[in-house]
């Protein structure tokens, strides 16, 4: 058996196109474009690429992009003052401070300073709390993208066994919350789990987000399972995921490739969240 390869690029393009159409309606109704502010501190090359792609996707969707680039030695106070200014700016519906920040800045303090109702990254503790209790807020873009891909394969996730590999605040924990909300039976496995393979062999759904190249072996996958690989690991053979793709795709029912799987969905979800934020702030119903 060979798995269906989940085309994240095509899903992302479809979502971005749908949001762009709704943005056009939003602009007619309000006379303004939804706005996303992206803040980059320093010149980390990977972050610079992400920020450029986010800015381009924002403009492609018909939204306003506000980019703020600050030098690597920026004081925390200066960054916090910028965040306060963006919180107060009515043209800004979404604020994203690109991570990682330079070591001398307390990233948690910066995330706490962002207005939770403009926190389109979903990293503010208020949004983490809202997700945990099922209240309206913002869900981090990567797990949201994973859920959209999974729902396309399994419109009804209820009752399925889901295993999330990794417990980060950005992916693993919010992913587990989303799957729980969909009435999956959710297990989170991590670096101290005694037998990761034993858990995975029972999983109908696997979401891998550990950051270890090809960590998950083909014979750990239950035949027919849906496998979502969040990993983006640079190795000597290029970009690889957290799953041994060649082996797993011979066993799984559906699997995301790396690259071209989850990655493009993350930016599409950022665009979606920004549109949703603009609608909430204008008291309009988001059409998604
Ligand atoms: N760095 C890598 N991915 C992300 C992301 O989704 N949001 C932010 N703010 N920083 C990141």
Image (cartoon, rainbow, N blue to C red):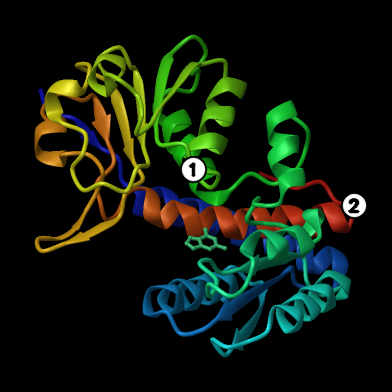
Q: Which mark is residue 168?
A: 1
User: Residue 26 falls in which quadrant of the image?
Assistant: bottom right
Disc 2 marks which residue? 283
Q: Position of residue 185 (x, y in %)?
A: 49, 13
Seen in the image, is 65 located left or right of residue 185? Answer: right
Seen in the image, is 275 located left or right of residue 187? Answer: right
For mark 1, give the secondary structure: loop
Comparing 204 with 112, the one in front is 112
Q: Residue at x 10, y 64 (%)?
A: 236
Badge 1 crowding class, 10 Å Cα cut-off, few under 14, some 14 to 19, many 20 or more, is few
User: Residue 49 falls in which quadrant of the image?
Assistant: bottom left
For mark 2, give the secondary structure: loop
Vertical relation: 112 (above or below) 198: below
Comparing 25 with 216, the one in front is 216
Q: Residue at x 64, y 84 (%)?
A: 68
Say whether disc 1 or disc 2 marks the residue closer to the N-terminus.
Answer: 1
Q: Is mark 2 within 8 Å of ligand 1?
A: no
């Amino acid at each position: 058996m060979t798995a269906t390869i989940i085309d994240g690029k095509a899903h992302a393009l479809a979502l971005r196109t749908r949001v762009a159409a709704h943005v056009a309606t939003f602009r007619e109704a309000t006379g303004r474009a939804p706005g996303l502010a992206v803040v980059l501190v320093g010149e980390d090359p990977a972050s610079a690429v992400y920020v450029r792609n986010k800015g381009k996707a924002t403009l492609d969707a018909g939204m306003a992009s506000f980019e703020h680039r600050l030098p690597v030695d920026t004081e925390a106070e200066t960054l916090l003052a910028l965040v306060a200014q963006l919180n107060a700016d009515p043209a800004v519906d979404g604020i994203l401070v690109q991570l990682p920040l330079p070591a001398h800045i307390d990233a948690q303090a910066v995330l706490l300073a962002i207005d939770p109702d403009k926190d389109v990254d979903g990293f503010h503790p208020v949004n983490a709390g809202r997700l945990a209790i099922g209240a309206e807020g913002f869900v981090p873009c990567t797990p949201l993208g994973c859920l959209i891909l999974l729902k396309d394969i399994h419109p009804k996730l209820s009752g399925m066994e889901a295993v999330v590999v990794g417990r980060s605040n950005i992916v693993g924990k919010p992913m587990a919350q989303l799957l729980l909300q969909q009435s999956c039976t959710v297990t989170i496995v991590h670096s101290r789990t005694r037998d990761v393979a034993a858990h995975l062999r029972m999983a109908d759904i696997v979401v891998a987000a550990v950051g270890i190249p090809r960590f998950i072996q083909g014979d750990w996958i239950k035949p027919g399972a849906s496998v979502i690989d969040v990993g983006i690991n640079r190795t000597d053979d290029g970009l690889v995921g957290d799953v041994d793709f060649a082996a797993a795709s011979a066993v799984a029912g559906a699997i995301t490739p790396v690259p071209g799987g989850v990655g493009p969905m993350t930016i599409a979800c950022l665009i979606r969240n920004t549109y949703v934020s603009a609608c909430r702030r204008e008291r309009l119903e988001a059409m998604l």
